[in-house]
Amino acid sequence: MVTLEPITVGGHVLVGVEVKLPKTTLLTISTSRGYIMCGALDVGLLNEKLSDRGIIAARAVGVRTLSQLLEAPLESVTIEAENLGILPGMPGSEALLRML
């Protein structure tokens, strides 16, 4: 099952997506420029094989809900996200504000 949910961060309405799969749930919250995602995101792939795309993204691990994704400290970020001042350890909600 796929669920789309409006997520408000700093007065901005963003898109939250939850995809329920067998034995796991994929979570992502996106802006028009980038996104944060659960541990399924392969930051290394984005930085290495897809570097020409300049993807702004960050990953939080151990999250099970969109609310947790907003609050969790980021475990890793893409190079393009770092260029915006998004750093590991930063809460997901703060990273999203920098992606606006």
Image (spheres, rainbow, N blue to C red):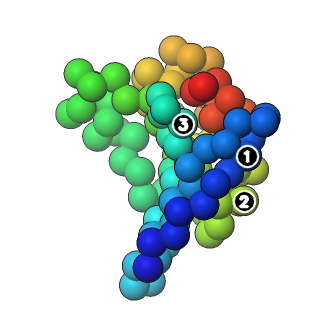
Q: In the rendered image, which quarter contains the N terminus?
A: bottom left
**Percent position (x, y) of residue 41?**
41, 51
- Please state which of the two labelled residues, at mark 1 or mark 2, is closer to the viewer: 1
Residue 93 can be seen, yes or no: no
Visible in this render: residue 84?
A: yes
User: Cα distance, mark 1 to mark 3?
Assistant: 11 Å
CB under 8 Å between discs 1 and 2: no
Q: Disc 2 marks which amino acid?
A: Ser
Query: Mark 2 or 3 closer to N-term?
Result: 3
- Which numbered disc flags the more N-terminal residue, 1 or 3? 1
Nearest the viewer among 88 and 84 is 84
Up/down of 89 relative to 52, above or below: below
Q: Which residue is mark 3?
A: 31
Which residue in the rendered view is the most extreme toward the bottom? 22
Amino acid beneath label 1: Thr
Label 3, secondary structure: give it.
loop
Q: Which residue is mark 1?
A: 8
Q: Nearer the viewer, mark 2 or mark 3?
A: 3
**Mark 1 element type:** strand
Camera-nearest residue between 89 and 35 = 35
Q: Tell me what residue is drawn at x 61 percent, y 44 percent.
A: 14
- Distance (Cα) linking label 2 and label 3: 16 Å
* Point 67% across, 42% down: residue: 13
- The residue identified by callout 2 is 67
Q: Disc 3 residue type?
A: Thr
| Secondary structure category for the residue under label 2 | helix
Residue in view at x 44 percent, y 21 percent:
80
Q: Position of residue 8 (x, y in %)?
A: 73, 46
Residue at point 70% right, 36% down? 12
Farthest residue in the right direction? 10
Residue closest to the eye, 48 or 38: 38
